[in-house]
Image (cartoon, coloured by chain):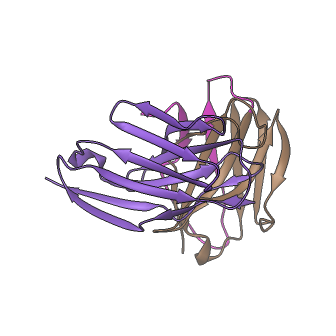
Amino acid sequence: SQQGEEDPQALSIQEGENATMNCSYKTSINNLQWYRQNSGRGLVHLILIRSNEREKHSGRLRVTLDTSKKSSSLLITASRAADTASYFCALGAGKSTFGDGTTLTVKP
Amino acid sequence: DTEVTQTPKHLVMGMTNKKSLKCEQHMGHRAMYWYKQKAKKPPELMFVYSYEKLSINESVPSRFSPECPNSSLLNLHLHALQPEDSALYLCASSQGWGGGNSPLHFGNGTRLTVT
């Protein structure tokens, strides 16, 4: 199975600041997906970006994909306390699995 | 609230018990999944059903037995579990299973404690 690796492992910011987290991978992919998980809850799908796309937006979320560097980034702008969660990338290539995630803490 | 419903939300069972976890979705999805998640770890894939047939078993011990009675329901039967099996069990569904090309929709999980 294929797995992305997120960094940083943990990120702590103030409300209103932007948060950036990265995902690197080693295989060819069809798409890359980002998920959010609030503590003790299920994962919520945020964005799917296909291998032929470079950037995608959804509300305050911006995802980029660089297939030449085998990396993706998730930017959350104007963060809120409610954005506190763990964020995972998943590779849409064969049997995708989740990396260890980035734990984001947004302080009010 | 999610569109994938898991019951029960919490389960405490002894090592000799038999119990079942249930998952239901009404989105017309044809692929359903079981994941296991330990604290502060990512979800680990256990099983994938595609069109009600078991497509993937990630070498899961036989004390976990999945069942897909129809396209909307997914069960996980538990028997003779060990304390280390205590975890959050997540069910997910997707429109299809073309090797990870469809977003996954997750339930909120069953928190299982084995005593």
Res B79 quadrant in image: bottom right
Q: Position of residue A97 (x, y in %)?
A: 66, 56
Residue at the spot 65% in from the left edge and 76% down from the top edge? B82
Give the camera-side residue of A106 and B70: A106
Q: Looking at the image, which residue is at 71% across and 41% down?
A: A30
User: Which colour is chain A painted?
Assistant: purple
- In the picture shown, does residue B26 fall above or below B41? above
Q: Which chain is brown?
A: B
Q: Is residue B19 magenta?
A: yes
Q: Is residue A78 visible?
A: yes
Which quarter of the picture shows residue A1?
Answer: bottom right
> Residue at horizontal 74%, vertical 51%?
A28
Q: Position of residue B15 (x, y in %)?
A: 64, 73
* Magenta stretch in the rendered image: B1-30
Where in the figure is residue B1, as x and y percent of width and height? 41, 33
Q: Please, is residue B73 above or below residue A39 in the view?
A: above
